[in-house]
């Protein structure tokens, strides 16, 4: 019988997956659960695509593309080559082996299975000991109001490469969504000792999670320390448009803005060495480490730092 998770992580895609891997590596098997953003999900070529869920799955399974941080390693693209030849939309890259998950997910959803159960089955077949949970079984879509007009997330992020200026965000379907019951079981468990918010984009990856009714309150009701890892290093994002979006929304790209964004939810913040002086002015418990995660040793170090801060907060 698998142990109940002692740590719950909240994650988006690439950056969150790196921390999730660090946590998986330093915790005993089965003691990690990861709640993953599904606001990025969309239907493309008739298939239900779950980019963040798949990135976390591939990362934890050790089969992610090592340079990209997303997609499968040793991938082939015969499907895309033929799609281009037939004049189909080729702006969203789908590898041949990656395609299998999208086909199988779509088939099982059409048969009435919940996304949570499908994801658990994928994780089991990949040999992943971590419990992977989508933030909801119903569809939620991150929509952006931009200077190029309203955009679905993948059109903004992939097709237009985050170039449009963002004015505001809406999470369509969030009001009707509910967290999976499996998450409630994790949060009610006496084994749970920490909740870690990964250094994913707070606006594009974590806010969709928190928009699901009751989720924020359920995280606080668990009565364990909630620790966030800042996605910024010296005012810049390691990857993605976090700093760009913060500027467009009228926010300073600094540690103080991250702390304010999570105010009322987090008890502590892990920051990079470059931001140590600023973190000392926040009035919030914090820990300092090098948060850039280039390899597994880095991932484990950041994971341990977050867990140690949670332990200090619980003491």
Image: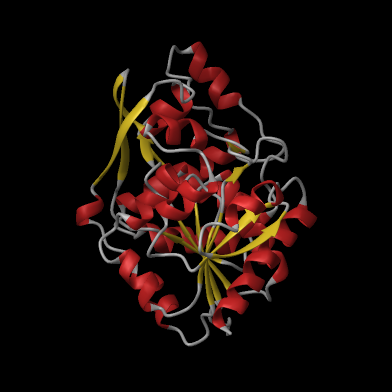
Residue lying furthest front: 281
Relative to residue 288, is residue 255 drawn left or right? Answer: left
Residue closer to the observer: 224 or 61: 224
Q: Quadrant of the C terminus?
A: bottom right
Residue at 25% x, 61% y: name it: 213
Relative to residue 78, is residue 214 drawn left or right? Answer: left
Residue at 72% x, 36% y: name it: 67
Residue closer to the observer: 211 or 114: 211
Residue at 29% x, 49% y: name it: 139
Q: Is residue 263 above or below residue 267?
A: above
Q: Position of residue 217 (x, y in %)?
A: 31, 70
Q: Position of residue 253 (x, y in %)?
A: 51, 38
Q: Position of residue 82 (x, y in %)?
A: 53, 18
Q: Quadrant of the N terminus?
A: bottom right
Residue lying furthest bottom: 190
Q: Is residue 25 above or below residue 85?
A: below
Observer able to see residue 269: yes
Residue lying furthest left: 176
Residue at 56% x, 77% y: name it: 313
């Amino acid at each position: 019988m698998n142990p109940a998770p002692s740590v719950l992580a909240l994650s988006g895609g690439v950056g969150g997956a790196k921390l999730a891997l660090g946590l998986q590596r330093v915790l005993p098997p089965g003691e990690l659960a990861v709640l993953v953003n599904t606001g990025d999900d969309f239907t493309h070529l008739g298939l239900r695509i779950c980019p963040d869920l798949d990135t976390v799955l591939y990362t934890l399974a050790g089969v992610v593309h090592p340079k990209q941080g997303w997609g499968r390693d040793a991938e082939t693209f015969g499907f895309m080559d033929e799609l281009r030849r037939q004049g189909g939309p080729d702006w969203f890259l789908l590898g041949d082996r990656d395609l299998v998950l999208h086909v199988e997910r779509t088939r099982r959803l059409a048969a009435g299975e919940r996304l949570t159960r499908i994801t658990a089955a994928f994780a089991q077949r990949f040999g992943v000991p971590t419990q992977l949970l989508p933030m909801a079984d119903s569809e939620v879509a991150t929509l952006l109001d931009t200077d190029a007009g309203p955009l679905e997330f993948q059109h903004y992020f992939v097709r237009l490469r985050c170039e449009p200026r963002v004015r505001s965000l809406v999470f369509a379907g969030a009001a009707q969504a509910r967290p999976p019951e499996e998450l409630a079981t994790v949060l009610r468990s006496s084994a749970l000792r920490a909740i870690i918010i990964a250094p994913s984009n707070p606006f594009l990856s974590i806010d969709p999670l928190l928009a699901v009714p009751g989720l924020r309150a359920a995280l606080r009701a668990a009565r364990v320390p909630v620790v966030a890892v800042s996605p910024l290093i010296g005012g810049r994002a390691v990857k993605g448009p976090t700093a760009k979006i913060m500027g467009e929304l009228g926010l300073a790209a600094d540690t103080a803005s991250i702390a304010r964004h999570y105010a009322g939810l987090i008890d502590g913040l892990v920051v990079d060495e470059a931001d140590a002086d600023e973190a000392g002015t926040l009035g919030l418990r914090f820990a300092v480490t090098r948060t850039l995660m280039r390899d597994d040793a880095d991932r484990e170090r950041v994971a341990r730092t977050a867990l140690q801060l949670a332990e200090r907060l619980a003491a």
